[in-house]
Structure formats: C-alpha cells, structure tokens
Image (cartoon, helix red, strand yellow):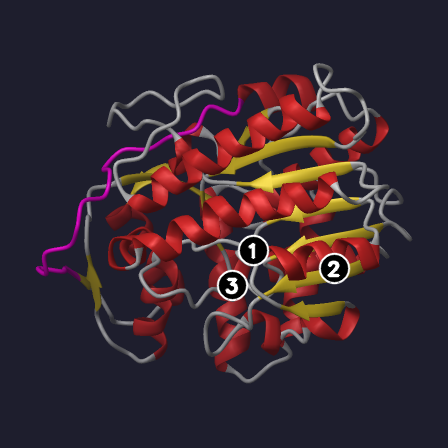
Amino acid sequence: MNPNFWSGKKVLVTGHTGFKGSWLSLWLQKKGAQLTGFALPPPTQPSLFELARVGDGMESVVADIATPGPILETLQRVRPEIVFHMAAQPLVQFSYQQPVETYRTNVMGTVHLLEAVRQTPGVRAVVVVTSDKCYENKNWHWPYREFEPMGGRDPYASSKGCAELVAAAYRTSFFGPESDGKYPAGVATVRAGNVIGGGDWTPGRLVPDVMKSLLAGQNVALRMVGAIRPWQHVLEPLGGYQLIAEQLWENPASCAEAWNFGPREESNQPVAWLVEQVINAWGGEQSWKPDTEVYPHEDRFLKLDSSKAFNLLNWAPRLSLAETVRWIVEWYRVLAAGGDIRQITEQQIRRFEELA
C-alpha cells in the first residue's frame, strides 16, 4: 500500500457504522482521506463506531442501502472517487430468520450501489465486499479459489454469491471492455475469511460471544466446536481492499475481478481451538462447553486460497493467529479498564502498518 495515496481522496464507505466499516473508516481517516459514510445506525450497542468516535472524522449519512434514492443522491452530491461497499446483513443465523431482508440488503443493496455509481461521473474504483461463504461449499478440506462456482445453502451465503454475480454483470455490461466505455470505473469484488478483532459485538459471532462471557466471568457456550474457519485479524483484509482500490485507481482494468484475502494455512483452525487460545490469553478461570441447542445448518469446513493476491499484488498476512489473539485480548482489556477506545484502535492500526 502507498501511505500517501489516500491523502485528499474523496472516498465513500457504505456500512461504515459496522465492525469492519468502523476499522476501515478510522484507517482511512488516519491516511487523510476525505471520507463519507453511508449506513444504517450502528447495528449493536455498544458499538465500535460510537466508542471510537468514528463519526468525528467523516460525514455520516444515515440511510438504507436497499432503498435506491438515498444512495444515488449521496453519490451525486459527494462525487466520490473511490467506493467501498460494505453495507450488508452479515449473519448466517439471522438469514434463516429474515431471508427476505437478507436478500433485500445484500443483493438489491449491491444493485442500487452499482446503479448509483453508473449514474455518477468521476468514480474511479469500486470495491464490493462479499464473503468467503459466497462459494458453493462442498465441505472439503481444500481452499476455494476465485474462479470456483458461487453457491450457498443458507440465505446469507446465497445472497453473497448473488452479490458476486450482480457485480460481475455490472462490470461486464457497464464498466468493462465489452461495454461502450462510458463508465471508466473499475469494479472488483473481495472475499475475506472470518475476520476477528476488537470492537465486534455482533451477536452469534464467535469472538464477540466469547469476550462477552469472559468480561462477565462466565463460561463460554460453543456451537459447532469442530468447524474449521479461516481466522484473520480484521486489518488483514482491509489492507487488501485498499491495495485493490489503489490498483484500480491507476488502471481501472488492472484488477477488476474477484479476489480472496484469507489467512495463512496455519490460521485455519477449529472453533474450539481458537476459543481455548482466547481464554488462555485472557488468563481467567473460565472454560467452554458445547452449546446443546439445535441451530439451522452451517457448513463445517471453509478455507480460502489467496495465492492470486500473494503472487499478483504482493499481498500477504502480517499477523499470526497467536498474535491476532493477543491483539484482541489487549483491545478488550483497554475496554474493561475504561480506556480510550479510539486510541487503542488507532494504535493497533499504526502497529499493523509498521509490520509491512
């Protein structure tokens, strides 16, 4: 990444009030971007967006991405040069409860965003954030590569596969070499692993549930203890997203395609293994036990092959999983002590940049 690239760039981040969006917004503020966010209010209480005072360094538009008017008005007023599309319904279990809302947000939200870009001159780069769950999961032990089929057994995974197909169709029809060349933006999609880090309170996610129990001095109840996931610190893929945007800015056709940003092989670990590491690093007397409730289906094995990003973008993960766990525990210790959340979050961003 070029540390000077972002200074003065006009950037729009959808979903900036969420976990990943808040981390990305703070990072871009640190780099001097002229930043606008577009999202619903923070999805959890507490939230990283509020505790780290993310809104202090940007314009924040509160609106629904699944309604076409507000996002079009915002783009045409702000005229961003770079767009990160992160607004989404992010939960597998919630998608079983609210499938229509999940498709409405994740599919039609992507349609509305790209249609607004198509009608807004000056956008050079669009990074559409989907998910590692967009692939047709065969529950095998091999990692998935970018050219493998989209799929999804649950509504969430299916909606993310649909979002990939929407982005590909818009890229070919309106932004690619087969279009009439009227819209010069480069459109890429990015797929990360299971991102973890300080400041996530999303219900049903592993680290938020574990830290909630540890902070309360309670034992941890785990579902799918043997499921293997590609764990990575939230800053790892966010760095990859920025790298893609920089490349698209220089040449919109250079990497206008799909990209995986997953962890190293040794970070693909079972749920129970990760929880034990977090508990040990926290240093309490808590333990974990299996959650005996019956939940809707989730895939048991999921890995990403990021060799394309390694070889073509010179991107690579910087933190080991053990270091990631230490950073998470460090972050939540500051929270438990009533410390400055914006300060610890920016400090971890700075340390991450120094690892380059």
Q: Amino acid at mark 1?
A: Lys
Residue placed most toward the observer, 45 or 177: 177
Which residue is at a point 40% across and 42% down the rendered structure image? 159
Please, what secondary structure does the residue beneath circle 1 have? helix
Which residue is at a point 81% across and 50% down the rendered structure image? 80
The residue tagged 3 is 198
Q: Amino acid at mark 2?
A: Thr
Q: Main secondary structure of the magenta part?
A: loop
Please, what secondary structure does the residue beneath circle 3 have? loop
Counting from the top left corner in percent of width and height, residue 270 is at 27, 42
Sequence-first tag of 1 and 2 = 1
In this picture, which residue range is highlighted in magenta?
289-306
Pointer 3 local density, CA inside 10 Å: few below 14, some 14–19, many at least 20: many
Circle number at residue 20: 1
Q: Are marks 1 and 3 in contact (CB under 8 Å)?
A: no
Give the quadrant of the N terminus.
Answer: top right
User: Magenta segment: does it hold 274?
Assistant: no
Q: Is residue 96 left or right of residue 118?
A: left
Residue placed most toward the observer, 230 or 110: 110
Give the quadrant of the C terminus.
Answer: top right
Sequence-first tag of 3 and 2 = 2
The residue tagged 2 is 74
Pointer 1 local density, CA inside 10 Å: few below 14, some 14–19, many at least 20: many
Counting from the top left corner in percent of width and height, residue 141 is at 28, 23
Q: Is residue 75 left or right of residue 330?
A: right
User: Magenta segment: does it hold 304?
Assistant: yes
Q: Is residue 251 left or right of residue 89?
A: right
